[in-house]
Amino acid sequence: SMDSHIIMFKRMRFNLAYFRHPPWDTGISPPELLAFIQSHPPGRALDIGCGTGTNTLYLARHGWQVTGIDFARRAINLARRKARKYGLEADLRLGDVTRLDCLAGPFDLILDIGCLHNLDDNGRKTYLQHVKRLLAPDGTFLVYLVLRRNPDDPGHGLLESHLSEITQLFSLHQRQDGTHNGNRLSAWLTLSSL
């Protein structure tokens, strides 16, 4: 089907990007995650779209039991290599973020930095149902998104109407608006189970 071809192409593109140095793979955990770790005791965490494992390993280093998942084989291999190099324990899995059936919750933290906004409508709905199932009753869903002002804007990004899909499934505690690469709108959402 057309969809599976698009997904294959996307996966290939992400895979190839990790052979260079993709701009999103900064190697630095964002202050939002640091602040979260400082104010919460370690528990179980899930890093969705973990890439080369920067945040997965940051959490592991701070005593969290972490699962990281990404569909780019190259990224997961690099993440596993880093984990070995630093002697850190993490469950790093190659997988599709819209098919998280293989995972069992509950997770005290579900982290998504820049993955959700790449999904199409169906992928997003399935993904959100999985997160809802996997999140502990008092857990936190921390997500970073690129936004679009209107549907005709080029590039990826969620519309405000998409955000309401999220806030219908989760309770929104905080929304921090900003810009992404200087020209796109972005937001950090801190959510919990309803």
Image (cartoon, helix red, strand yellow):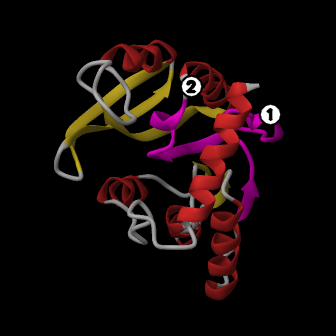
Q: Residue at x 68, y 51 (%)?
A: 71
- Magenta residues, as a range? 91-119
- Which residue does the numbered mark 1 point to in the structure image? 101
Residue 117 appears in the figure: yes
Q: Residue at x 38, y 63 (%)?
A: 23
**Eyeballing the image, is 73 above or below 110?**
below
Residue 97 appears in the figure: no
Q: Amino acid at mark 2?
A: Arg
For the residues labelled 1 and 2, the Cα–Cα distance comes to 15 Å
Locate residue 123, reporting x and y percent. 62, 26
**Eyeballing the image, is 168 above or below 171?**
above
- Which residue does the numbered mark 2 point to in the structure image? 124
Q: Quadrant of residue 57?
A: bottom right
Locate residue 109, reporting x and y percent. 54, 45
Q: Quadrant of residue 7?
A: top right
Crowd band around label 1 with a 10 angstrom C-alpha radius: few (<14), some (14–19), many (20+) = few
Q: Residue at x 78, y 39 (%)?
A: 104
| Mark in front: 1 vs 2 | 2
In the displayed structure, does residue 176 sit left or right of residue 86? left
Q: Is residue 117 magenta?
A: yes
**Eyeballing the image, is 156 above or below 45?**
above
Q: Secondary structure at mark 2?
A: helix
Q: Amino acid at mark 1?
A: Asp
